[in-house]
Image (spheres, rainbow, N blue to C red):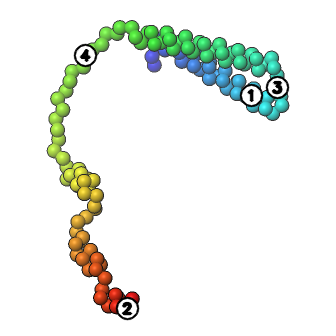
Amino acid sequence: MNTDPAERQLIDAETKLARALQRLSALRRAALYGSYDATEFDQAVMAYRSAEAEVLDARKSWAERKESPVNVVPVEEEEIMLLDPTPRLLFAKWLVQTGKLSDWNVEEVEGPSAAPEPELLTAA
C-alpha cells in the first residue's frame, strides 16, 4: 500500500465523487418515478459539484507531486540474445507465409477434377 499523501487524498476524493454520483443518480430515478424533493436534489447536486472540485484539486496536486524530481536509477540495457527457432515456430511461420495447411497431393487432386470427363460432356 502506498503511503503517499497526495495519492491517498486523490483516492478519497474519487471515492467521495463516486458516492455523490450514486446519490444523485438515485434521486434522478426517484424524480422520474414521481417522488421529487427539490431541496434534497439541490443538495445532492451541490455535493456532487463539491466532490468534483475536490477530485480536480487532488489530481492536480498528485500530478505536481509526480512531476517533482525523484531519484531515478538508470536502467542498464541488456543485450538481447536471439534464440534458435523451434520446429513448431518454423511450421507456424511456413503456414502463415503459404496459407496452406498441406501441400500433399495437391496436384494429383486438382488434375482429374479440373477437366470434366468426356462422357459427361456428351450427355449434357
Q: Earlier in the sequence, mark 2 or mark 3?
A: 3
Looking at the rendered structure, the kind of residue marked 3 is: Tyr
Query: How many C-alpha atoms fall within 10 Å of the one at disc 3: few (<14), some, or many (≥20)?
Result: some
Residue 7, image x and y in percent? Answer: 49, 14
The residue under the point 53% across, 12% down is: 58
Q: Which residue is mark 2?
A: 123
Q: Is residue 81 above or below residue 51?
A: below
Amino acid type, label 1: Arg
Distance from disc 4 to disc 3, alpha carbons, whole Å, reads: 60 Å
Residue beneath label 4, please?
74
**Marks 3 and 1 close (CB-CB < 8 Å):** no
- Crowd tier of the residue under label 2, counting other residues whose Cα lies within 10 Å: few below 14, some 14–19, many 20 or above: few
Q: Secondary structure at mark 1?
A: helix
Looking at marks 4 and 1 on the same chain, the residue that comes earlier in the sequence is marked by 1
Residue matched to label 3: 36
Between the C-alphas of marks 4 and 1, the distance is: 53 Å
In this view, the mark in front (4 or 2) = 2
**Residue 84: assigned label:** none
Q: Quadrant of residue 17?
A: top right
- Residue 103 placement (x, y as % from top left): 23, 66
Q: Secondary structure at mark 4?
A: loop
Q: Residue shown at 39%/88% (left/top)?
A: 124
Tell us which disc is closer to us: 2 or 3.
2
Residue at (66% x, 15% y) in the render:
49
Tell me: 100 left or right of 42: left
**Residue position marked by numbered label 1 in the rendering:** 28
Q: Tag 2, which secondary structure?
A: helix
Q: Amino acid at mark 2?
A: Ala
| Mark 4 vs mark 2, CA separation in Å | 83 Å
* Gap between marks 3 and 1 measured at Cα: 8 Å
Q: Is residue 58 above or below residue 100?
A: above
Q: Is residue 111 visible?
A: yes
